Amino acid sequence: MNYISVSEFAKKWKMPERTIRNYCAQGKIKGAFITGVEKGT
């Protein structure tokens, strides 16, 4: 299975990266997941 980064997906679909991240978090992109999320303080 091939995976692409959020930035690659955003460029391919001409959408902001933040939108793609939100869609992933909301489960709107079938089969999508985000790894290595860091929370800053």
Image (spheres, rainbow, N blue to C red):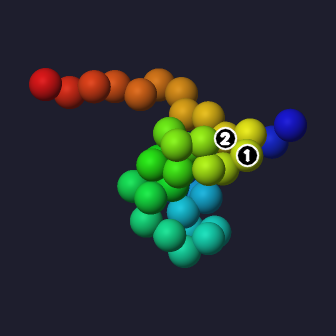
Q: Locate the C terminus and report the quarter of the image it occupies.
A: top left
Amino acid type of disc 2?
Ala
| Rendered residue at 63%/69% (across/down) | 12
Extreme bottom residue here?
A: 14
Check the image and report above or below for 21 versus 25: below
| Rendered residue at 60%/42% (across/down) | 27
Q: Which residue is mark 1?
A: 30
Asked whether 31 or 27 is in front, the reply is: 27
Check the image and report above or below for 16 versus 21: below
| Whether label 2 touches label 1, CB < 8 Å | yes
| Rendered residue at 62%/35% (across/down) | 33
Residue 17: image location, x then y, percent:
44, 58
What element does badge 2 sit on?
A: loop
Extreme right residue here?
A: 1
Label drawn at residue 6: none
Check the image and report above or below for 19 versus 37: below
Q: Which residue is mark 2?
A: 32
Q: Residues within 10 Å of mark 2 (few under 14, many from 20)?
A: some
Between marks 2 and 1, how big is the CA–CA gap?
A: 6 Å
Check the image and report above or below for 13 versus 17: below
Asked whether the viewer can see residue 5, the reply is no
Asked whether the viewer can see residue 9, the reply is yes
What element does badge 1 sit on?
A: loop
Asked whether 27 or 33 is in front, the reply is: 27
| Rendered residue at 74%/40% (across/down) | 31
Q: Residues within 10 Å of mark 1 (few under 14, many from 20)?
A: few
Disc 2 or disc 1, which is closer to the eye?
A: 1
Q: Locate the N terminus and report the quarter of the image it occupies.
A: top right
Amino acid type of disc 1?
Lys
Residue 20: image location, x then y, percent:
51, 55
Is residue 12 found left or right of 3 in the rendered image?
Answer: left
Extreme left residue here?
A: 41
